[in-house]
Image (cartoon, rainbow, N blue to C red):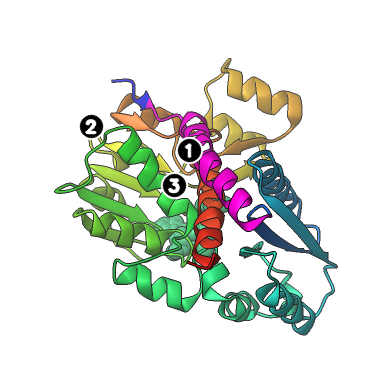
Amino acid sequence: MTARLLDGRAIAAAIRESVLPDVHAFTARAGRPPGLGIVLVGEDPSSEIYVRNKVRAGTESGLWVDLQRLPADASLDALLALVSRLNASDAHDGILVQSPLPSAMGKSAAQQVFDAIDPAKDVDGFHPVNVGRLVQGRAHLMPCTPSGVIEMLTRNHIPIGGTRAVVIGRSEIVGKPMAMLLLQRDATVTICHSKTPDLPAVAASADILVSAIGRPGFVTPAFVKPGATVIDVGISTVTDASIASRLFAEGSARLADFTRRGSVIVGDVHPSVADVAGALSPVPGGVGPLTIAMLLKNTVTAAQARLPV
Ligand code: NAD
């Protein structure tokens, strides 16, 4: 079997297209475009790329994107003061603080920052109020990556209700909200993590398997029921030739790519899973573009909710 590839770029383009009329209508009514404030602390190379893509996508869709940078040695107080300023701003409908924050800010910094964002502007859906609403099935703003996965499934007509779903990874930003969204659509959901016994056997019970752990090629064919849908959320940069040759066949285009550049972006799912799965989301070009499309959608949703009735 060779899995059907789930093209995240095409779905993201369709979602971005679908928000345009709302952006135009908002801009006409409010006399300004929906505004998204993005805060980037420091110069983490991956964050720089993610933020650049978010700024570009937002601007292309007619949003006003305000990138606010703080130096890597900024204090947590300075970051909280900036969030407070964006909370009070009329022009900012959405606020996003890019993770990870510099480790010098302390372990609880990210949570303190998410707690400080006005829930009405929390386009990442990480504020406890929005997490609570998500758990209760009445979320207004939902985390972008898991809601992008749901779009990927539904727009590909992959049934969720009545299926068995397994989510590998239990982070606040992907694993837990992913499990909630699948549960709300009537899947029977199991969450796996680093202490789960016999993980491959649990994973192989899934009709829908979502992996979000950040370990290159961790999910092998032994984890996959034949014909299952496999969604690869993981994104890792591989620079080690021995890992690249474990993932990609001799003579393959991806291995040639690695040899040329000295690095390659990979997911959690080993390429050989394509021989077993029924459908598979690639990395790159799978969940990543959807995350950005859902961020734009959330920003427009937040902006519309702030308009007076
Ligand atoms: P995280 O580090 O916060 O969480 C990782 C989770 O994986 C933890 O719950 C941990 O228990 C679990 N885990 C780690 N090793 C494991 C193992 N050997 N077996 C089972 N479980 C294990 O990461 P995160 O923020 O949830 O991100 C996960 C991955 O998804 C990363 O690669 C990240 O880059 C990627 N990501 C992609 C997007 C996207 O847009 N595609 C968005 C967010 C995160």
- The residue tagged 3 is 148
Q: Measuring 23% from the left and 53% from the top, which residue is drawn there?
A: 185
What's the amino acid at mark 2? Pro
Mark 3 or 1, which is nearer the eye? 1
3D distance between C-alphas at marks 3 and 1: 14 Å
Within-10-Å neighbours for mark 2: few <14, some 14–19, many 20+? many
Query: Is the residue marked by circle 1 packed among few (<14), some (14-19), or many (20+) residues within 10 Å?
Result: few
| Residue 30, picture quadrant | bottom right
Q: Which residues are magenta?
A: 5-31
107 is higher (above) or lower (below) than 170: below
- Under mark 3, the amino acid is Gly
Counting residues from the start of the chain, the first of labels 1 and 2 encountered is: 1
Q: Residue at x 56, y 18 (%)?
A: 252
What is the x, y in percent for residue 39?
Answer: 72, 64
- Residue 226, label in figure: 2
Image disc number at residue 18: 1
Which secondary structure lies at badge 1? helix
